[in-house]
Image: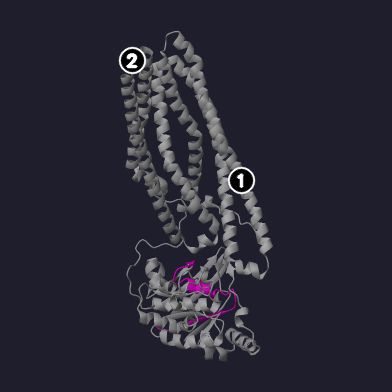
Amino acid sequence: MPTVAPPDYEQSVTATGNFLARNPLAKYLWQYKHYYLVSLIATLIAAVISLLVTTYLVEKAISYISEGRSISALGQLASLVIVAGLIQSVFGWSGRWFGSTASREIEYYLRADLTKHFLNLDQSFFLKTRTGDLMSRAMNDLQAIRDMIGPIASAMGRMIIVLIVGFLVLLTMNVKLAFFSLAYLPLVGLVIAFFEVRVEHRFNAVQEQLSILTDAAQESMSGVKAVKAYAREESEISAFSSQNEEMRKRAMSLATYQAALWPVFVVLGMGTTLIALFFGAPAVIDGELTSGQLVRFILVLGIISWDLMMIGWVISIMQLGLVANKRITELFRQSPVIENAETSLENYDATGNIKFRDVSVLFGEAVVLDDINLEIPLGQTLAIAGRTGSGKTTLVNLLPRMNDVTTGSVEIDGIDVREYRLNVLRDMIGFVPQEAYLFSDSIINNLEYGQSDPTLESVATALNVSRLSKDLEQLDNKLDTLIGERGASLSGGQKQRAALARTVLKNAPILVLDDSLSHVDTNTEEEILAELKIYMKGRTTLLIAHRTSTLRTADTIVMLQNGKIVESGPHTELVTANGPYAQLYKEQLAVEALGVDLDQLEIDTPINGVENT
């Protein structure tokens, strides 16, 4: 299986607005600033109790022992130590709870915003982006961000507080010993910098490979029919194993550095204690410190050392989170090409008069449609014929703005489609594509996708028009039958008829049928066309078809060649004219006489990543 290169997000469209608008994470961090403030205050109180109160009580206990105080006096100090520990635990827990709660809430909103953003992007973005890469960013990267702004944020706040307060406590006890004990901190900074760069590079490599691996698995499972049909199981397994091995190598490289962080910082942390003992013992002998003060000094230094040891873990998670946030922000800064106008029409009750005025469409330098002028009056049916690559699908895609015109305009009821809100425009149109997409759900839920809470009568009508009702008799659960991913348990013809039923149930004033009966047998097609003729009364219809039996039902047929209309008129008139349509018609009659399926003669092919038939 060929490996697809990662998408180039460096060309992302930078969002306009202030800093918070351009950075979703920063926006939510600001929104939850009160949670983090409470977390910081609680962590501060817990650190102060630990550094000042608890260590002071231990110092006093050792002094009591040296002075030979009573057991009851020591018991009182022990009770105070327990109380201080409980208070410290409560505030420590509160600090972590507020930080973790904020991180979970922010993750929830970021995931919801990202999903909404995906659905607002147009199909051109998804045509050039790997599904596996998007899935990896939406799942793994958001989790890395959550870890960074949750426990790591609390841990970082505690570290800063402990280092500042702890250093001040040590200075008040013995300035010289404090500087000796902390003199090697620059060494800690160098070690942090060393690991930071290497962890960042390796995490990026792991995330990129995970995207490729996810995409490979998704394609193999989605295309399992093709894999089995061509007996390519071993080839797919081999290709996946190769990518999986690369993933293992990158993950092990990252894990090696992450695993090394902890022992390295343990050694660095222990160094402080050794220095304190080496220089502190002579100070006790010389009377500069009491034994209780030395023990307290070592306890405070131990707390600081513990937080120093946490730096490795914090830096590692922070680095992963920052990289993940960069990858997520790149997605948020992708802008849809097709957007609502600033003064878009809302709640418009369309009738269905359609006009194409001087329409041309270019994909890169390729001219797909050239100077198209058409008018389809309310209630009329227009059929679009042409060979593969003539621009048929591109033409009908302009109506719901799946693509936009390069020049010219497409109008509904005299209003440019770009002036409608996208949801209003697409609500006017019932669109049945050739490749019907069905969700992994029940048949009824797929039918109701375009119309929630339909009446039983409307469902019966949709099933009758599409002739899907005949197939339900063979299913145990009828409309509640689960059809598998992408409708895997249905045949090609059944999927097309289910998509047709869904559109009929939508009951839109404009109907677009893009070769939507290509997989249906001839007898069933004739039955459906008879029902559709009744259903289409009063509706403006555009249809693409290969079979002349479908084309001849239209009021007008236009023939496309190389993106241009070369002739138009009713079926009988075009056949009599003996032009390109008549030639196509005669060829199809000859093929039908031989018993060959016409659908094997034309297969819609994409031009520059966009369907172009």
- Image location of residue 365, percent across then percent down: 57, 64
106 above or below 509? above
| Magenta stretch encompasses residue 393 | yes
* For marks 2 and 1 on the same chain, the one whose residue lies earlier in the sequence: 2
Outermost front residue:
71
- Please tell me in which quadrant of the rendered image residue 380 appears: bottom left
> In the visual, does 568 lie left or right of 36?
right
Which residues fall within the magenta stretch? 379-406
| Magenta stretch encompasses residue 565 | no
> In the visual, does 1 lie left or right of 269?
right
- Image location of residue 108, percent across then percent down: 40, 52
Q: Which residue is mark 2?
A: 69
Residue at screen point 61% across, 86% down: 588
Q: Which residue is mark 1?
A: 250
- Image location of residue 561, percent across then percent down: 58, 77
**Numbered disc 2: secondary structure:** loop
- Image location of residue 129, percent across then percent down: 54, 58
The amino acid sitting under disc 1 is Arg
Q: Nearer the viewer, mark 2 or mark 1?
A: 2
250 above or below 189? below
Query: Is residue 364 or residue 33 the one in the foreground?
Result: 33
Marks 2 and 1 sit apart, C-alpha to C-alpha, by 61 Å
**Numbered disc 1: secondary structure:** helix
> Badge 2: few (under 14), some or many (20 or more) residues near its Cα, within 10 Å?
few
> In the visual, does 4 lie left or right of 120?
right
So how many labels did they put on this image? Answer: 2
Residue 247 visible, this angle: yes
